[in-house]
Amino acid sequence: QVQLQESGPGLVRPSQTLSLTCTVSGGSITTTNCYWAWIRRPPGKGLEWMASIAFRGTTSYSPSFKSRTSISRDTSKNQFTVQLSAVTPEDTAVYYCVQVGAGWSPPNYWGQGTQVTVSS
């Protein structure tokens, strides 16, 4: 069974770059027709799709995140990472990594989420 685990800092300072890594076990991030994505939920708001990377490495970004977001992967470690630059307090949220299949919704697997707070 696929399991996903987020890791990264719980607190970052404004203007810095947030880097979060998702470690995948029980399945390969290169498995055909699997897509790997980062989603977040700010306080009091709904889920926001940030970015995804496909089984062959193709990346996709939500328009609202494209200018300051980068998603990448390390196939040797079965991990994928999202970087969000120039963070502000509005980037405070619970961040999730997820896996989706060809149908994209709903996600097949979720990480448990990690709380990230942007504060001075």
Image (cartoon, rainbow, N blue to C red):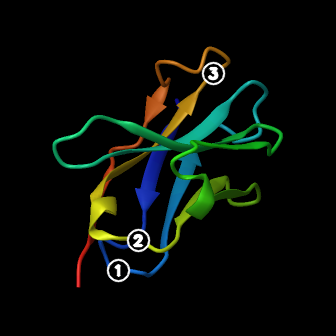
Residue located at (37% from left, 73% from top): 9
Residue labelled with disc 1: 14
How far apart marks 3 and 2 lie (CA) works out to: 30 Å
How far apart marks 3 and 1 lie (CA) works out to: 35 Å
Please name the amino acid that badge 1 sits on: Pro
Residue 72 occupies quadrant? bottom right
Please name the amino acid that badge 3 sits on: Gly
Q: Earlier in the sequence, mark 1 or mark 2?
A: 1
Q: Determine whether the residue tagged by mark 2 lies in a helix, strand or loop.
A: loop
Please name the amino acid that badge 2 sits on: Val
Of discs 3 and 2, which sits in the foreground?
A: 2
Q: Earlier in the sequence, mark 3 or mark 2?
A: 2
Picture layout, residue 97 above or below residue 33: below
Residue labelled with disc 3: 101
Residue 69 visible in the current orientation = no
Residue located at (62% from left, 55% from top): 80
Residue labelled with disc 2: 87
Q: Earlier in the sequence, mark 3 or mark 1?
A: 1
Residue 36 picture location, percent across and down:
61, 39
